[in-house]
Amino acid sequence: MIAALFPRKPGASSPGDYDYLNARVRAMSTELLAPEFYEHVLASFTEGLLRDSLLASPYAADVRRAIIDVGSSGLCRVIETAVARNTHAAFGKILAMAPPEPRRLVSLVINRWDVANVVALARALIAGAGPRESRAALLPIGELSEQQLIQLAAVADVDALADAVTSWKHGVASVMRRALIDCDEPDDPRAVERALYGAYFAWALAQLRPGDPHERAARDCIRMAVDLVNVGIVLAHVRDKTAPGGPASAGPEGIVERGIIPVAVLREISAAPALESAFESLMETYLAPGIEKGILSFGQAQSLAVMEGFLEEVVLARGCRLFRRDMLGVTVPLGFVWRKYCELANLRLLARGIAYGMPPDAVRQELVNA
């Protein structure tokens, strides 16, 4: 009777959408690696120990398959391939068993990695890279499968990429195609990246209705991703304008609206006379823990990518906390998505740390606690 008096709005969520889904996702979370796994590997920190530890974990089947598929490329490539496949399968499992409304919200967030892969392919094509080099830049954990991405990596140029991406029957595919076609500077990788991310964020946020509590978490996830892109644009602008012979620019191009950090604040930061001053200004935002943790590493490496990695850690940690924020809503599957991605990032860090001879303590500092 009550349901008849107050009918559900089309597309709106109901608690029943999440009961079964969240129970299954919580069961999936029991297979995430415990902190003891990382400490065990770091204690000896060899390729053999990492491989054997993963072969005794839920990653075993994926590692064995990757050894067959890419074993000649080295253990680091084996592990990265296995972990990416496992993550893609976990995300696909959530989407397959989710009712329409939770599936829509989770998909909007996962599509971030699909767009990142199209950005990587566009950059590779502009740089004249071949299919092999293009594939090496991919992280196939979004909705696009490994095979679909391999097909996209085989195209000849950005125009062909724009046409090929629409073979993926998804709303964001046409958005990416239009962004590639309409980009004013198709030979500038930064301009193409700004166009793709700007189009995705605008599209994704337009799918979310204000006031729906189930959609708030998805919106927060996307807005944090907006912040990472915007901060990257701003910091690159400060670096370039302060470099010898750097361009005299009035301000950074491509800042996306509707992130958590206001555009006005970002423009103030972009006016900083040096990167260190820009970092000080970012200390007034929620990204402050990343600045605090990364400032020493940045000073040693003088690499903006290093600092951006620490800022992403802040976003990852906030995303992981969604898992326990509301046990009856979409925060459970979204929180799992972030926790699984953290696990992927940590395992890639272990594999690369061993391959590059990084000290275990340095790797331990960069691990993200989910």
Image (tube, rainbow, N blue to C red):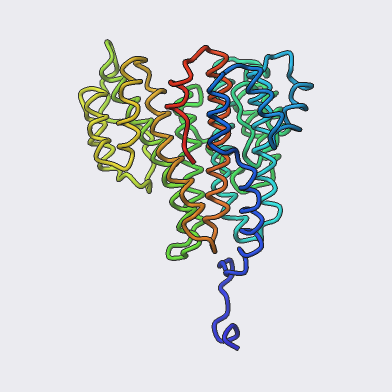
Residue positioned 59% across, 26% down in the render: 121
Percent x, y of residue 254:
38, 35
Left or right, 290 with reference to 125: left
In this rendered view, identify the residue nearer to me: 243 or 99: 99
In this rendered view, identify the residue nearer to me: 228 or 68: 68
**How many badges with numbers are in the image?**
0
In this rendered view, identify the residue nearer to me: 10 or 137: 137
Percent x, y of residue 185:
46, 26
Residue positioned 38% across, 18% down in the render: 303
In this rendered view, identify the residue nearer to me: 287 or 278: 287
Residue positioned 48% across, 19% down in the render: 360
Quadrant of the frame with the N terminus: bottom right
Percent x, y of residue 355:
57, 14
Residue positioned 53% across, 61% down in the render: 327
- Say if 319 sits above or below 278 in the image: below
- Say if 51 sits above or below 92 in the image: above
Left or right, 276 with reference to 56: left
Residue 116: quadrant of the picture: top right
Percent x, y of residue 119:
54, 30
